[in-house]
Image (tube, grey):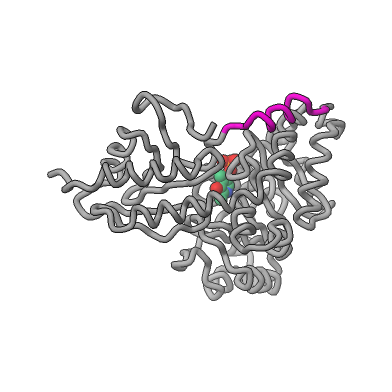
Amino acid sequence: MPISDVTDEQPGRVVDLRSDTVTRPGADMRRAMAEAEVGDDVFADDPTVNALQDRIAERLGFEAALFVSSGTQSNLCALLTHCGRGDEYIAGQSAHVYRWEGGGGAVLGGIQPQPLPHRADGTLDPADIAAAVKPDDPHFPRTRLLCLEDTIGGRVVPVDYLRAATGLAREHGLATHLDGARLFNAAVAAGGDPYEQARLIAGHFDSVSVCFSKGLGAPVGSALLGSREFVARALRWRKALGGGMRQAGILAAGALYALEHQVARLAEDHANAALFAEGIKGVPGLVVGDAQTNMVFAEPAPGLSAEEVQERLARRGLRCAGYPGLLRFVFHLDVSRADTEEAVRIVRDALDVAPRG
Ligand SMILES: *Cc1c(COP(=O)(O)O)cnc(C)c1O
């Protein structure tokens, strides 16, 4: 069923573009979950969790993987494994790990972030990275880790940049972590075999986090990947964080289904995002950016707040995410081409009028 049945804004059809986390498992995924063989994963006994960990590790070219409850838990396990108390990690000012995860590294690990400004394409300036690495001197925290994100704000980070930035990090003795919540969106956008492309991206990093519960459409779960030794240490942190999940094979089955069947189709989300961006370009009241993988961002024109636009759209059955001065539309498994056309129609209807006031 392509249309979500959320009905709190208006009765009937709602196209939900708030995030790619809103997808619901389809019949085949639910069947795979219901029929999953399970065991106690804290005893490493759950065959489906083990199968998922083996499969994602192989797909991304790592020795080992750990199934975790969320992307946040995955990044946090990575921070705690790479860094100790009084260490610091370098990340972008808008990086999820720095800005959107409750400061978990500081709260639970005594790990200090060193945020850096993003360039227009979402990357960090290598000169800024180099300058942020502290000398070995008791005045300073020990700089241990560079965290990058791909996709970031829907943008694909060029692989040449990943190579250069991680190379620079290594020259300075830093470990490298990729928050690849939407790694497969970047891989699919590159064209060709998506697993091959994902390996090319992931291969530059010591550890990688990838989400099954975003565009891939599983209900719950992420994986943290690294060397066998890294993952063994991360496993201790997962336990300490309360992430030992017993018969987690029920969840892992959904993630495994997503990994096997719902990667290549991300291209449809990207095509729908592009169609939507084209369709709403030139609508008065909105400055629309280019579609970047599965996301479209738009700025309300002066005199119109994001909240006001969001409300007008919601009243007509289109939900999106709103930030100060910015709207975000995210395309996913539960948004069909017909839904996309409907979303364009709604934006036009909601805004093709003189802004009030
Ligand atoms: C969603 C997201 C996460 C965190 O995932 P949760 O499962 O929501 O905790 C981490 N990084 C990025 C880039 C994300 O988009």
Residue 332 as seen in the image, left or right of residue 224: left
- In the rendered image of this protein, does residue 245 appear above or below residue 147? above
Quadrant in which residue 350 is drawn = top left
Depth order, front residue of 315/94: 315
Can the viewer see residue 136 in this picture? no
Q: Which residue is drawn at 65% across and 57% down?
A: 178
Residue 210 as seen in the image, left or right of residue 233: left
Quadrant in which residue 32 is drawn = top right
> Residue 260 at x, y = what percent?
73, 44
> Residue 338 at x, y = what percent?
45, 42
- In the rendered image of this protein, does residue 196 appear above or below residue 24? below
Q: In which quarter of the image is the N terminus?
A: top right
In magenta segment, residue 105: no
Give the magenta part as a residue range.
Answer: 24-37
Q: In which quarter of the image is ligand 1?
A: top right
Q: Quadrant of the C terminus?
A: top left
> Residue 347 at x, y = what percent?
32, 45
- In the rendered image of this protein, does residue 342 appear above or below residue 14? below
Q: Which residue is drawn at 40% across and 55% down?
A: 277
Residue 177 as seen in the image, left or right of residue 154: right
Depth order, front residue of 2/98: 2
Can the viewer see residue 340 in this picture? yes
Depth order, front residue of 16/129: 16
> Residue 346 at x, y = what percent?
32, 41
Depth order, front residue of 187/147: 187
